[in-house]
């Protein structure tokens, strides 16, 4: 089974699935290495961010964690070693901007990631039209490439991105960076739910909503309109506050399990 199939199976077997984002090497390399296997048991899929100095899609929380991780020596090599040593139930995705991947070299990157047990990649600053070299290198090593869509993606492009995505489609819930709130009033929730329903209607892959999901109430509300939810900034803030992020994930999981979502 290739990486895209492993990711899709993890999402569908738990639908609605819970995807936990951790910044690689945060709060430091040792504590990240200790947290990763626990999170792979608590969540259905784990997305590990490769810290980068110019993270265009990330809000202040992820930026802060990335800067701290970089200052403490995290890089692609240390993260791949941590993934390889982690074990655990949930597949692992790497989220990285393009520069670190170009520096590693696509073919070598794909081989090393597959050896470490990575199942796929998310690359927010890589347009679909320029993704073929990386896509081919990842596919050659049995890894998937997840595509992102947003509320302002035009319908024809939305269909192309959904068809091209491996494992799941990452439905960004806001027209900004990570770390805000997905919706604040009934009209915003209605627009968000309609957008997720629209993506699911055209996607052959499961659809996971990310950006701005911060509470069990958010999880419960969106769980009826997505195949999975991606939680990042709120988890990083739990770590910063000295609380257990695994406990936070367990609370979100309980909220997701309560509502009964409509059949697709």
Image: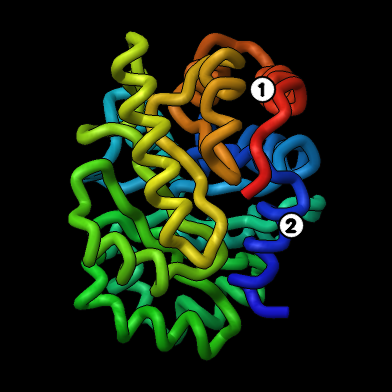
Residue 88 vs residue 250, the one in the foreground: 250
Mark 2 Cα shell of 10 Å, populated few (<14), some (14-19), many (≥20): some
Task: List x then y, in percent, for residue 214.
Answer: 49, 19
Q: Secondary structure at mark 1?
A: helix
Q: How is the image coloured?
A: rainbow
Q: Give the Cα separation between the discs numbered 2 and 1.
A: 26 Å
Q: Residue at x 75, y 45 (%)?
A: 14
Q: Which residue is mark 1?
A: 252
Residue 68 seen in render: no
Which of label 2 and label 1 is nearer to you?
1
Residue 177 vs residue 199, the one in the foreground: 199
Residue 59 figure quarter:
top left
Q: Is residue 118 left or right of residue 102?
A: right
Task: List x then y, in percent, for residue 85.
Answer: 74, 57
Q: Secondary structure at mark 2?
A: helix
Residue 84 seen in render: yes
Q: Residue at x 54, y 48 (%)?
A: 47
Task: Indicate whether 115 appears above or below 127.
Answer: below
Q: Is residue 160 left or right of residue 78?
A: left
Mark 2 or 1, nearer chain start: 2
Task: Indicate whether 109 appears above or below 11.
Answer: below
Mark identifier at residue 51: none
Mark 1 Cα shell of 10 Å, populated few (<14), some (14-19), many (≥20): many
Task: List x then y, in percent, for residue 3.
Answer: 63, 72
Mark identifier at residue 85: 2
Q: Is residue 88 left or right of residue 249?
A: right
Task: List x then y, in percent, for residue 37.
Answer: 75, 44
Q: Residue at x 77, y 52 (%)?
A: 13
Task: Indicate whether 16 appears above or below 60.
Answer: below
């Amino acid at each position: 089974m290739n990486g895209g199939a492993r990711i899709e199976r993890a999402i569908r077997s738990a639908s609605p699935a819970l995807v936990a984002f951790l910044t690689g090497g945060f709060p430091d390399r040792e504590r990240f290495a200790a947290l990763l296997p626990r999170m792979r048991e608590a969540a259905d899929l784990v997305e590990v961010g490769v810290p980068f100095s110019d993270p265009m899609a990330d809000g202040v929380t992820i930026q802060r964690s990335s800067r701290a991780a970089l200052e403490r020596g995290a890089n692609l090599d240390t993260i791949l070693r941590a993934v390889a040593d982690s074990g655990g139930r949930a597949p692992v995705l790497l989220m990285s901007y393009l520069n670190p991947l170009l520096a590693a070299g696509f073919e070598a990157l794909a081989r090393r990631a597959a050896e470490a047990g990575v199942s796929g990649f998310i690359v927010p600053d890589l347009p679909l039209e320029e993704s073929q070299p990386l896509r081919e290198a990842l596919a050659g090593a049995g890894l998937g490439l997840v595509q992102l869509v947003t509320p302002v993606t035009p319908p024809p492009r939305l269909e192309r991105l959904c068809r091209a995505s491996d494992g799941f489609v990452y439905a960004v819930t806001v027209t900004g960076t990570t770390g805000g709130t997905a919706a604040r009033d009934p009209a915003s929730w209605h627009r968000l739910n309609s957008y997720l329903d629209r993506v699911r209607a055209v996607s052959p892959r499961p659809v996971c909503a990310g950006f701005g999901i911060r509470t069990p109430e958010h999880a419960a509300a969106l769980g009826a309109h997505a195949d999975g939810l991606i939680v990042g900034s709120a988890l990083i803030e739990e770590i910063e506050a000295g609380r257990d992020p695994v406990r936070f994930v367990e609370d979100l999981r309980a909220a997701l399990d309560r509502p009964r979502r409509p059949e697709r």
